[in-house]
Amino acid sequence: MSEFLPFTRPLIDDETIEGVAEVLRSGWITSGPQVKAFEAALSEYVGGRPVRAFNSGTCTMEIALRIAGIGAGAEVITTPLSWVATSNVVLEVGARPVFVDVDPLTRNIDLSRIEAAITPATRAIIPVDLAGLPVDRDRLYAIAKRHHLRVVEDAAQALGSEWGGRRIGSIGDFVSISFHPNKNVTTIEGGCLVMNDAEEAALAEKYRLQGVVRCGYDGMEVDLVGGKFNLTDVAARVGLGQLPHLAAFNSRRRHLAREYFAGFEQAGVGELGLDLPVADFVNSNWHMFQVVLPEERLTIKRAEVMRQLHAAGIGTGVHYPAIHLFALYRRLGWKPGDFPHAEHIGRNILTLPLFPAMQDGDVARVIAAVQRILRAHARR
Ligand SMILES: Cc1ncc(COP(=O)(O)O)c(C=O)c1O
């Protein structure tokens, strides 16, 4: 039997591994010159905007909200179909998330429903580019401008995606990106925040490390409560080794995604009842290839499909269950039925293997297994 195929796997070259060893031998392993170099490379990538690196893509969003002065009494509009970090950060700063259902086609926040959710307490929108498919930035920023709202783009999954021919991160308000190992480039754990000006960047540095500002040889001042969110030089060196591969990684991902579309077409997607993602080969970085299972046409549930795929040597993932149905969020008042599209997708979405080192033959193997399982368990 062929080797187990995970749904994703980072690809780190020998030069990066050697570079990490050099940092480890250098005597300076926490935040230092590698972080500065990584931030400079990221800033260059996003057209010169200020960028600071952090130890997660979660804290970057929390810090963006703090920089924007968003806290108790404020409402922040976001999607219920994301990693729970997206709305947890809103709670973390003391504000209230306001969920808006997703568009069943894009699986991203339904922009046409945002304005109805705006109240006098609304301060910001956190859109999420699920699987790297960007939210329409023109419509999003038109709404934000009309209602004087800040935007914290949760572009955790969207490094290398584009809107209107411009890179995500090079346009917009705050842009948060994650470098978790599943992402298109990794620092093991880590993230970065793209901001608007030097003032915001200085605030971000304070929130990143205990609120501390240093000056001269011995000057130190603290005037706000910061956290412990700095990235290490070891992690930054991994990121520096990854960035030059981003374009090639994403082009390989696009190729594999095309193979999925062609293969599912041949397998008769219509007959299988599977929902495929939007076939976007202009804007998306193809962070994930996700299908939505036809629950009404199957005699088994998603977990059993996953188990059978696993038994066939194929790893899959769930990104994500609807956030508002988690116990924490139900306690805060949300309930089943609130966001039907997010709930349906959250119950049935399945992430199939997609990563740069995958072979074309792997795609065919996944499609054959999915086809076999869905056919064997179709309702008659
Ligand atoms: C959509 C989304 N938002 C936020 C995050 C948080 O990023 P991190 O895991 O780096 O904190 C992730 C990644 O895990 C994500 O996929």
Image: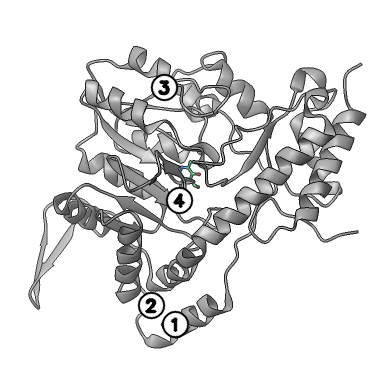
Q: Which residue is mark 1?
A: 24
Q: Could you tell me which residue is drawn at 67 percent across and 61 percent down? A: 357
User: Whole-Å distance between the Cαs marked 4 and 1?
Assistant: 27 Å
Pick whichever, 46 or 326, lies toward us: 46
Tell me the amino acid under the disc marked 1.
Leu
Q: Could you tell me which residue is drawn at 72 percent across and 42 percent down? A: 260
Judged from the image, the secondary structure of the residue bearing numbered disc 1 is helix
Earlier in the chain: of badge 4 and badge 1, it is 1
> From the Cβ of disc 4, is ligand 1 less than 8 Å away?
no
| For residue 239, side relative to residue 352 (left or right) | left
Q: Which residue is mark 3?
A: 111
Earlier in the chain: of badge 3 and badge 1, it is 1
| For residue 165, side relative to residue 341 (left or right) | left
Q: Is residue 313 above or below residue 67?
A: below
Q: Which residue is mark 4?
A: 159
Q: Which residue is mark 2?
A: 29
Q: How many marks?
A: 4
User: Whole-Å distance between the Cαs marked 3 and 2?
Assistant: 44 Å
Q: Is residue 331 above or below residue 198?
A: above
Earlier in the chain: of badge 3 and badge 2, it is 2
Judged from the image, the secondary structure of the residue bearing numbered disc 3 is helix
Q: Is residue 228 visible?
A: no
Earlier in the chain: of badge 4 and badge 2, it is 2
